[in-house]
Image (tube, grey):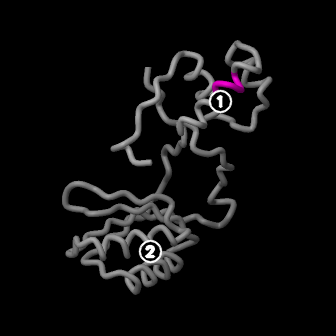
C-alpha cells in the first residue's frame, strides 16, 4: 500500500518495545519477546497479530550476508532518463523489479531520476547487469558508484514516539 492512502498506526510504549525486540531478532519465541517486553505471552501475541493485520509488520525474513555468498560488490546506480511517459516508466519498473541484483530502487526528485542499489559478485557481473538493463529499456545516462565500504546497514526503523 502506498503512503498516500495508508493510515498511520499509533504505537504505544508496549508496541514500540515489541517492535524493537522483533527488529533485532524476529526468531525469538513469544515467551522470550514477552520476557524482554515485561509482559505475558498472550498480550504480546495479540499485539503482534494486530501489528501484522495493520501492515506495520510486513514480513519476517532471514537477512543474508552478501560477502559469504560471494556478492562482494555493491553499486549505487544513478539513472537519468529523457523519457517520462507512462509506457517507459512501466517498462523500467517491470525490468528493475525483475532483476534480483537490485536490492532497492527509488524514484528521486532533482537531477537524478532513479537510484538503484545493486549487489553483484564483481565489476564483470555489474557490467552484465548493466548490459541487460539497457537492452530492455532506453536510458539517457547511467552512473555507477562502487561502495568501497559499508559503514552502516540496518533494517531497523526508528520508531515514532
Indicate the position of residue 15 as horizontal and vertical percent values: 57, 22
Crowdedness near tag 1: few (<14), some (14–19) or many (≥20) residues, C-alpha within 10 Å:
some
Q: Locate residue 14: give its quadrant.
A: top right
Q: Which quadrant of the figure contains the C terminus?
A: top left
Q: Residue 7 location in percent, x, y?
A: 41, 34
Circle 2 residues within 10 Å: few <14, some 14–19, many ≥20: some
Q: Does the magenta-highlighted stretch encompass residue 45?
A: yes
Magenta span includes 156? no
Specify the label residue 48 is tagged with.
Answer: 1
Answer with mark 1 or mark 2, whichever residue precedes in sequence: 1
151 or 119, which lies in front?
A: 119
Q: Main secondary structure of the magenta part?
A: helix
In the rendered structure, which segment of residues is drawn in magenta? 44-49
Q: Name the residue rendered at 69%, 37% in the picture.
A: 26
Q: Secondary structure at mark 1?
A: helix
Q: Is residue 35 left or right of residue 121?
A: right
Please name the residue shown 40% across and 39% down the image: 6
151 to 13, vertically: above or below = below
| 46 to 25, vertically: above or below | above
| Between 45 and 144, the one nearer to me in the picture | 45
Question: Dot 2: what SS?
Answer: helix
Residue 123 spot, x, y in % from top left: 49, 75
Mark on residue 68?
none
Which residue in the rendered view is the most extreme toward the bottom?
135
Q: Give the alpha-carbon distance from disc 1 to disc 2, as whole Å.
A: 35 Å
Q: Is residue 19 above or below residue 129?
A: above
Q: Residue at x 28, y 56 (%)?
A: 108
Residue at x 26% of width, y 63% of height: 113
Q: Viewer-nearest of labels 1 and 2? A: 1
User: Which residue is tagged 2?
Assistant: 95
Q: For this view, does 9 lie left or right of residue 18?
A: left
Amino acid at each position: 500500500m502506498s503512503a498516500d492512502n495508508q493510515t498511520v498506526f499509533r504505537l504505544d510504549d508496549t508496541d514500540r518495545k515489541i517492535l524493537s525486540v522483533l527488529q533485532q531478532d524476529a526468531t525469538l519465541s513469544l515467551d522470550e519477546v514477552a520476557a524482554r517486553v515485561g509482559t505475558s505471552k498472550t498480550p504480546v501475541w495479540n499485539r503482534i497479530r494486530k501489528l501484522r493485520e495493520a501492515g506495520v509488520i510486513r514480513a519476517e525474513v532471514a537477512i543474508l550476508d552478501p560477502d559469504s555468498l560471494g556478492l562482494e560488490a555493491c553499486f549505487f546506480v544513478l539513472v537519468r532518463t529523457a523519457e517520462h511517459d507512462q509506457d517507459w516508466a512501466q517498462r523500467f519498473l517491470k525490468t528493475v523489479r525483475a532483476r534480483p541484483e537490485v536490492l532497492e530502487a527509488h524514484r528521486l526528485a532533482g537531477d537524478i531520476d532513479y537510484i538503484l542499489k545493486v549487489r553483484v559478485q564483481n565489476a564483470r557481473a555489474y557490467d552484465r547487469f548493466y548490459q541487460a538493463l539497457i537492452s530492455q529499456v532506453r536510458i539517457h545516462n547511467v552512473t555507477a558508484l562502487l561502495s568501497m565500504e559499508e559503514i552502516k546497514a540496518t533494517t531497523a526503523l526508528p520508531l515514532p514516539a
